[in-house]
Image (spheres, rainbow, N blue to C red):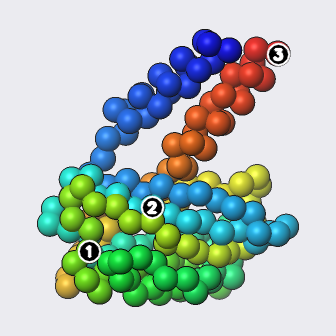
Amino acid sequence: MRKLVCAAAALAALRATAWATPVEMRYVATRVDAERWQNTYTVENISLAPAIDEFTIWFDYGLYSNLGLPGVALGPGGWNELIVQPDPLLHDDGFYDALATGGGLVPGGSETGFTVLFDWHGLGEPASQRFDIVDPVTFATVYSGVTVPEPGSVLLLGLLAMLRARR
């Protein structure tokens, strides 16, 4: 058991150093019912200057449908949210977009509570998604990345895999 805990700690340290990026977007996926899921995102501005004022999370048209908002307040910064549904006729992905109405997220800042409901049509649990940090004035993409599960989820999956391998 001690080796498992050490291995999990090493995995967490490796994750922190190997994937250092200017922006990190983490999520927690929660099953609502058979096909309905809810992702709650945390956006962390590690070093992107001057601030994150807008971001977009993409939902692949073949895997997601029926996007929605739960109608909860997001936090002290104030953000306007927009949902656009995936379009299977045009093969267009859907998206969730959040625009800061205040000062946005400065380097070192983070905010959580960005929540999207959706129907998942893939196998297993919903996976990572593409996201873009957008300049709200020019609409240019400033940074692109991929969402990652919350660290606790990664450690738990690593521990489960090690336990199965041990058996």
Residue 46, visible in the rendered structure? yes
| Mark 3 closeness class: few <14, some 14–19, many ≥20 residues within 10 Å | few
Q: What is the quadrant of residue 97 in the picture?
A: bottom left
Q: In the orientation shown, which residue stands out farthest toward the left?
A: 50
Q: Which of the 4 quarters of the picture holds residue 59? A: bottom right
Q: Nearer the viewer, mark 2 or mark 3?
A: 2
Residue type at the position of mark 1: Gly
Residue 143, compared with residue 65, is above or below; it is above
Residue at the spot 25% in from the left edge and 83% down from the top edge: 102
Quarter placement of the N terminus: top right
Q: Judge left or right: residue 167 versus residue 8.
A: right
Mark toward the start of the polypeptide (3 vs 1): 1
Q: Secondary structure at mark 1?
A: loop
Q: Does the CB distance between marks 3 and 1 fall below 8 Å?
A: no
* Residue at 58%, 35% in the rendered image: 155
Give the amino acid at mark 2: Thr
Left or right, 47 with reference to 153 = left
Which image quarter: residue 109? bottom left
The residue pinned by badge 1 equals 104
Label 3 sits on residue = 167
Distance (Cα) linking label 3 and label 1: 48 Å
> In terms of secondary structure, where does tag 3 sit?
loop
The label shown at residue 42 is 2
What residue do we see at 58% from left, 74% from top? 116
Q: Position of residue 46 (x, y in %)?
A: 27, 52
Q: Nearer the viewer, residue 103 or 96?
A: 103
Quarter of the C terminus within the rendering: top right
Residue drawn at x 65%, y 75% is: 117
